[in-house]
Amino acid sequence: GPPLLSVHNLHTYFPQEEGTVKAVDGVSFDLYPGRTLGIVGESGCGKSMTARSILRIVDRPGRIVAGEIRFRRHGMTDLTQLDANSDDMRAVRGAEIALVFQEPMSSFSPVHTIGNQIVEAILLHQKVSKRQARARAIEVFRDVGIPLPEQRLDAYAHQLSGGLRQRAMIAMALVCNPSLLIADEPTTALDVTTQAQILDLLRHLQQEYGMAIMLITHDLGVIAEMADDVVVMYLGRVVEHAPVDELFHAPKHPYTQALLRSIPHIRSRPRERLASVAGSVPHPYNRPTGCPFHPRCESFMPGVCDQQAPSLLPIGEQHDVSCVLYHEERS
Ligand code: SF4
Ligand code: MG
């Protein structure tokens, strides 16, 4: 069937006095209903900004300068054509595309109970009574495995443990049955045991709610456990896109290969899974010419790789890569 979300050639730029930061610089991918797309890369590669662009919550002076974000709702709506503060876009945010992120404290107000905030969120998007909203909140707290849901709804965010707060944030994201859940480093701040529980929960909820998940992480272990398909990003661009097994067993892009080499034992202690590739991500004002990865690439070819940024081109049925090594093979 058709994709739920189709991002095409998205560019989100931040004009600054020192120059323009190209946070998202030509990103394309499709996400299908009920599937999980992992988006992986080191911090600063544009993963979160891609998500914020989709939700139209890019902070000024950042702006989507080109591209399309087609989302399936009454046909395919190009979200870039909606006003960020319009009723339509508000309906998309929260009710159709929900976001969970690393720090649940910042998604709850400290001065209202969690229950009141969740009830408000339901009333904002659904024509139900306060009593029905409360019942829905209790139901979704049960769904996310929060014990004693009625008591927990009357708590304030700081009164819950980190793991319960994360579950409460996921509950808040689910109250309106979104068709897409964007999870941005949802387990990064959690201890190993809680991390595993939250990933299990997301998998379980995906089945129960039938939603698609866009999972943003720097952790290839999380990708291996959760994703159906993977997008690897570097400096605002997609460098490789493949089904998860193919990405792990036959990575093509030198950056993907380096990321995978940096984690000798994927299923070992999660704290050791932090990707570290030789060299560091260049400062966004000093974007390399040509292939953005060329200063760190072992296969760098002077006069080729530093001249023109390679496009993302198919090298297999569902496998795309942006590297001249493979493009030359084609011709
Ligand atoms: Fe390396 Fe050149 Fe491929 Fe870039 S285009 S990843 S520099 S070989
Ligand atoms: Mg981020």
Image (cartoon, helix red, strand yellow):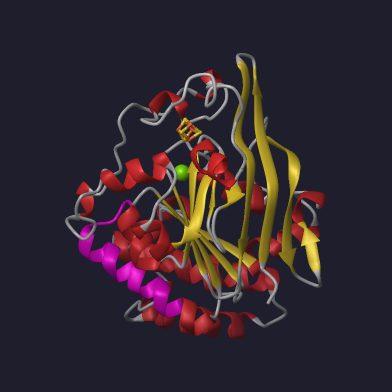
Residue 65 or 130: which is nearer the viewer? Answer: 65
Q: Quadrant of residue 59?
A: top right
Name the residue rendered at 37%, 77% in the picture: 151
Name the residue rendered at 68%, 44% in the picture: 10
Residues shaded magenta: 187-205
Magenta stretch contains residue 162: no
Q: In this view, does 178 lie above or below 221?
A: below
Name the residue rendered at 62%, 80% in the picture: 130
Horizontal and vertical percent for residue 42?
Answer: 40, 40
Q: Is residue 234 above or below residue 135?
A: above
Horizontal and vertical percent for residue 212?
Answer: 55, 70
Relative placement, left or right, of 190 versus 56 is left
Residue 313 or 288: which is nearer the viewer? Answer: 313
Residue 321 or 111: which is nearer the viewer? Answer: 321
Quadrant of image for the C terminus = top right
Residue 213 or 248: which is nearer the viewer? Answer: 248
Horizontal and vertical percent for residue 146?
Answer: 35, 76
Name the residue rendered at 60%, 85% in the picture: 132
Horizontal and vertical percent for residue 38?
Answer: 46, 58
Task: Note whether residue 116 is visible.
Answer: no
